[in-house]
Amino acid sequence: TEQYPKLDKQEQTEVVMDVQHLKGPGVKDVSFQLRKGEILGFGGLVGAGRTESVQLVCGITGKTGGTITYKGKELKVKNPKDAIEQGIALAPEDRKKQGLMLHMSVGENIYFPSLLQISKHNVIDYTKAKNIVGEYIKALAIKTPSDRQICKNLSGGNQQKVVIAKWLAKNPDVIILDEPTRGIDVGSKQEIYGIMNELIQAGKSIIMISSDMEELLGMSDRIVVFCEGRVTGELSKTEFCQEAVMSLASQS
């Protein structure tokens, strides 16, 4: 009966990532802090610079200014591989084009980012691969006839779970979810929210970019609002309301 599952938790204070005056393509001046065990929501209108900012953090595009401090040290990433190796994972907005290999199986998609960990002398240990795949199909309740099912044949919600599963298999500390429930049904949304809560209970940190106002207000612990490539404000849980977000999202 409750769309957004609530957790009883204390406000987190340990800062995992501190971004100051970040600049780059589509980003003019972005600063925010991500704390351990929280869901930090990114709000704003389409084209406000939310996705572009996390792409700079993950090394998808190169930053032209600003600093990123991660676990007390300056974060230096030249490409997404560097970010992944340091425990930062991004589930992109377009799962079909950027998040999945649709023509490959559920199992192949899940274990693909972990190939180095499950291979020896460039030969895949399929026993390890199958164990990883089975663990995350069960943990995320991915509805599939088998791990050999081709990803394009899954529903949107189960495709999104596969995207999340492949990164959880890498055991990241920071998970960035860009529009995590876009285009999926209400039941699958509930399951995704439950997974997010389990992650933060395990001490992970989540950045959630969402254009769904109810989702943003319902799942976030804090909200950073963007407008035209800049951060225009931050809202704590007690300040959450649609009017406050929209007011900050329209400030240039």
Image (spheres, rainbow, N blue to C red):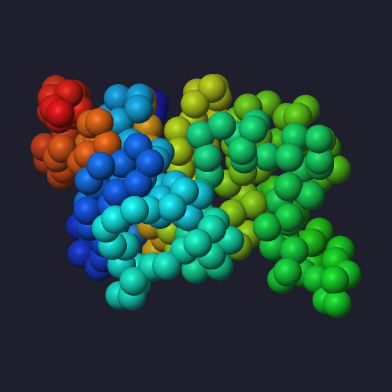
Above-or-below relation of 226 to 155: below
Residue 48 place in picture, x, y as percent: 30, 31
Q: Quadrant of the C terminus?
A: top left
Residue 79 place in picture, x, y as percent: 54, 58
Above-or-below relation of 84 to 220: below
Residue visible at 71% across and 71% down in the picture: 117
Residue 47 lies in quadrant: top left
Residue visible at 83% across and 76% down in the picture: 120
Q: Is residue 25 left or right of residue 118?
A: left
* Extreme residue in the front direction: 64
Residue 167 place in picture, x, y as percent: 59, 54
Front-lying residue, 185 or 53: 53
Residue 72 place in picture, x, y as percent: 30, 75
Residue visible at 81% across and 40% down in the picture: 104
Q: Is residue 50 left or right of residue 28?
A: right
Q: Is residue 100 left or right of residue 16?
A: right
Residue 80 appears anywhere in the view? yes
